[in-house]
């Protein structure tokens, strides 16, 4: 697990503070780095013993014959998660080095631990980015992609929601946003990373209201500190195959967030994403989301209400029902859809949903 570069860094940093030669050796006994360049890539028999036993070995004149191609000194294991990842050797008289040996070993393990953790974190970041890009661009869930998903520290379970974040202050974003994400999503089933220049992605999983609301709240709070921070929130979807829709919704929301300088939900600007072919995924998702809970009678009532230009009396006569019955139906539609047909802005959305649904149905026939 020790690279040659890390071994050379350990030798360089340690020898700046000691007047002794330092060797860093792999668990297989190969000297990776040394103050004595002639010893690099040679086999160190003493290090092999240390790697196998996890014990410190002192080589002196009494036992040096047992370990060919070695010199007197102290050889100690470099441990990481109870495994030997290397051996650190200090050349010289062991009596002169006993007091500093443990300190050298501790310092070396700290350096190795930090480098290994950073290497793993970097790999995980790249893996996250690969998975996100593949899923939001509709890549097939083949064996290779599934293998990468299995290496995530959590399961990708629905519902899902994509959030995109951008910040014009590039240097600030590079230094701050990743750490903000790390603190915000610590031990949470969230995929987050760098998407493109000055833009970051967040993929929320298991996206119930209790899980997502605190994250949205934290993002709002962060925006108060950074006015130039722009946040676009995509729609919630149930399956991984629908992530391209949530991603495109987040991108649409981010565009309007940049214009209006406020955290923007896709649902708030969804109307503007509909200026495209009626068979598009956004169009179908729009009218299905709004009308999915209405039955045939409620859809007929709603369409009639629009045909009568929102006039209750005229609509009641058209449907041959009492005005109170019509009011009851309209209130029920409001409960089922979340939109009030008698409120102008809600009526516009309901009317568009009905019209798009009708056009799509006619095309299917």
Image (cartoon, rainbow, N blue to C red):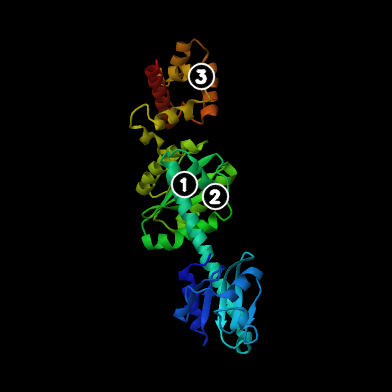
List the residue tagged with mark 3: 298
Q: Would residue 320 appear left or right of 52 to someone viewing this image?
A: left
Mark 1 secondary-structure assignment: helix
Residue depicted at x 55% and y 71%: 29
**x, y percentage for residue 9?**
47, 74
Instruction: Kindly report the distance in space between the C-alpha atoms of the residues bearing marks 2 and 3.
Output: 48 Å
Against 219, residue 59 (above or below) is below
Which numbered marker is on residue 151?
Answer: 2
Q: Nearer the viewer, mark 2 or mark 3?
A: 2
Task: Give the total number of marks visible in the rendering.
Answer: 3
**Can residue 96 be seen by looking at this rendering?**
yes
First in sequence: mark 3 vs mark 1: 1
Instruction: Kindly report the distance in space between the C-alpha atoms of the residues bearing marks 3 and 1.
Output: 42 Å
First in sequence: mark 2 vs mark 3: 2
Mark 2 secondary-structure assignment: loop
Crowd class of label 2 (few under 14; some 14 to 19; many from 20; radius 10 Å): few
**Can residue 264 be seen by looking at this rendering?**
no
Instruction: Kindly report the distance in space between the C-alpha atoms of the residues bearing marks 2 and 1.
Output: 11 Å
**x, y percentage for residue 91?**
55, 84
Crowd class of label 1 (few under 14; some 14 to 19; many from 20; radius 10 Å): some
The image quadrant of residue 82 is bottom right
List the residue tagged with mark 1: 131
């Amino acid at each position: 697990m020790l690279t040659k570069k890390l071994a050379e860094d350990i030798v360089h940093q340690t020898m700046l503070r000691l007047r002794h030669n330092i060797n860093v050796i792999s668990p297989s006994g190969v000297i990776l780095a040394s103050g004595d360049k002639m010893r690099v890539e040679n086999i160190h028999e003493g290090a092999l013993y240390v790697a196998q036993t996890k014990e410190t070995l002192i080589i002196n004149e009494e036992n040096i014959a047992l370990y060919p191609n070695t010199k007197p000194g102290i050889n100690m294991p470099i441990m990481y998660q109870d495994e030997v990842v290397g051996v650190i050797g200090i050349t010289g008289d062991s009596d002169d080095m006993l007091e500093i040996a443990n300190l050298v070993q501790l310092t070396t393990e700290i350096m190795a631990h930090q480098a290994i953790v950073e290497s793993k974190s970097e790999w995980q970041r790249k893996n996250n980015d690969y998975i996100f890009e593949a899923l939001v661009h509709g890549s097939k869930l083949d064996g290779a992609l599934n293998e990468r998903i299995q290496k995530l520290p959590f399961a990708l379970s629905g519902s899902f929601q994509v959030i995109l974040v951008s910040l014009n202050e590039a240097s600030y974003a590079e230094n701050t946003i990743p750490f903000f994400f790390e603190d915000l999503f610590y031990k949470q089933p969230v995929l987050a990373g760098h998407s493109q220049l000055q833009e970051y992605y967040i993929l929320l999983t298991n996206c119930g209201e209790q899980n997502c609301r605190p994250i949205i709240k934290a993002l709002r709070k962060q925006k108060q500190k950074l006015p130039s921070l722009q946040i676009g929130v995509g729609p919630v979807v149930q399956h991984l195959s629908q992530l391209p829709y949530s991603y495109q919704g987040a991108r649409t929301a981010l565009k309007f967030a940049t214009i209006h300088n406020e955290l923007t939900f896709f649902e708030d600007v969804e109307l503007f994403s509909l200026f495209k072919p009626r068979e598009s995924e956004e169009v179908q998702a729009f009218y299905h989301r709004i009308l999915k809970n209405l039955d045939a009678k409620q859809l007929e009532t709603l369409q009639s209400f629009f045909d009568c230009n929102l006039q209750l009396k005229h609509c009641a006569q058209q449907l041959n029902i009492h005005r109170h019955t019509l009011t009851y139906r309209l209130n029920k539609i409001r409960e089922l859809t979340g939109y009030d047909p008698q409120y102008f802005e809600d009526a516009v959305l309901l009317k568009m949903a009905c019209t798009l649904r009708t056009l799509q149905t006619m095309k299917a026939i």
